[in-house]
Image (cartoon, grey):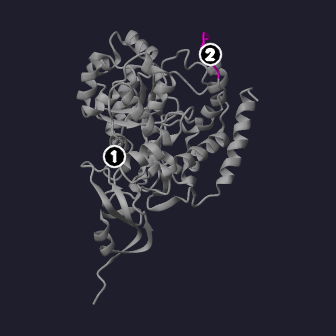
Amino acid sequence: MADKTEACDVLIRNAYVLTCDAKRTKHPKGAVAVVGRKIAAVGPSAEIEARFKARRTIDANGALVHPGMIDLHYHITQHMIGKMIEEASLEGEDPLAWIGRQYTGMSNALRPEEEQANAQLGALDMLRNGITFFVEPGTVHTPDAVAEALTEVGVRGSLADPWMIDVPGPAFEAITAVKPDTKHCVSALGGQLKRNADPDARVRGHVAIYGVGGQTLDLMRAAKSLGERTGGPFNMHQSQSVDDAEGDTRRFGKNPLVRYAEEGLLSPSCVFVHMNVLREDEIAPVVKSGLSIVWSPTNSWYYGTRQQAPNRIPGLARRGVNVTLGLDVSKAASFGDQAYTAYVLARDQGDYLSPEDILQMQTLNGARAMKVDSWLGSLEAGKRADIVVRRNDLPEVWPRHNTERQQILLARGKSVGIVMVDGEILIEGGRHAKLDESVIYERADRAARTLRERAGLA
């Protein structure tokens, strides 16, 4: 009798599968079959095992399996810089001088070698925490050098044109790469979109401007139009702090999201980062527009924004706004902390987001924001095989009850066991399966010393 089984490259069996599809389908005793770069099938373990004969079988031993997570906002070449900023109270002091010496000083000291070292270390950090795709907001000085580093480590990334700022101001004057000119910015927009020509390239491009007071309405209009014409997002920082939001209100004569709506600048192509400070009259334009919000709960917590204004993002998520997450910079948290922080901050103000809500933000919602949800963001047949297999040999995940909460909130990044991108196993046994991590660490250490010396901080 002929063997009717199909061949697959990898079969993940005996798993608690969260597909993160639009219906949030789950298979408590599930399996995933992978052929090449794509998912061939997802379903009950007995059914999938009977259908496929695998070259390699991974027994998940009942642990959680879900799509690779997506971080929608990370300044990848400032990965080490955020960690190296010295601790200080700054009580009663103007923080700008301290920021200039520390953060801006080291950022200006970046050269291609240091940007590559930052990118390699950051990409490794992401993968080991289950992040398989991230979005850089346009603060990389040398995108080609960073793309090379990301490709070597294997993570997916999307890069934007550097420093699209056309309004001069004290926040930007110290950044040597900034050329505050509308004509320059408009002509440079879209330079990274060339990376999307290869459908298999892991490093892509998108349209972004900096925002937070550094953009004219004309630059916003050009960026939104280009994003829509090319089928991608238009990304920028918006309403990060009370000062930022109040500055926009003074500039535009109205609260910024209200003015944007009047100018026709809000649409599903918009991906606005932070949105920590929203006024009552800005809620309806946000909900109506279909835009996506990238919430950085650790950023909000770090800067104490919650103490100055109510955070409306959990409520907006309940009203159907596409909310996703971004770490921003590793200062007081890492990639594995995002879900926990979002959960606790929502609880802190009397809101509620379930662990599964937050995982959906980090998977399908992220893919939707980037307009790649047709092939990424959930475990469905035909989509790319970006998969995280968790571990359950940790005290945090026992007893095996409330699996989502225990794995996502309690064990966090510690429970990430195997990470696949495009069907390729990149993380296994807690380490990179293809690279010597010690080389990455040594390179990062050299780059860190060089940055501090150039910035006069050694």
Q: Is residue 258 within the magenta segment?
A: no
Within the image, what quadrant is residue 62 found in? Answer: bottom left
- For label 1, the residue is 364
Residue at the image point whose x is 55% and y is 20% from the top:
172
- Label 2 crowding class (10 Å Cα cut-off): few <14, some 14-19, many 20+? few
Q: Can residue 7 be seen in this view?
A: yes
Q: x, y (%) of residue 307?
A: 44, 17
Residue at the image point whose x is 32% and y is 54% from the top:
19
In the rendering, which numbered label is found on residue 340? none
| Secondary structure of residue under mark 1 | helix
Extreme bottom residue here? 1
Residue at the image point whose x is 50% and y is 47% from the top:
413
User: In the picture provided, is 75 more to the left or to the right than 64?
Assistant: right
- Residue interval drawn in magenta: 88-94
* Badge 1 amino acid: Leu
Within the image, what quadrant is residue 218 found in? Answer: top left
Q: x, y (%) of residue 412?
A: 47, 45
Please, is residue 119 above or below residue 269 in the view?
below
Q: Is residue 72 visible?
A: no
The N terminus - image quarter = bottom left
Extreme front residue here? 399
Q: Is residue 89 within the magenta segment?
A: yes
- Mark 2 or 1, nearer chain start: 2
Mark 2 to mark 1: distance in Å?
A: 40 Å
- For label 2, the residue is 90
Q: x, y (%) of residue 408?
A: 42, 45
| Secondary structure of residue under mark 2 | loop
- Label 1 crowding class (10 Å Cα cut-off): few <14, some 14-19, many 20+? many
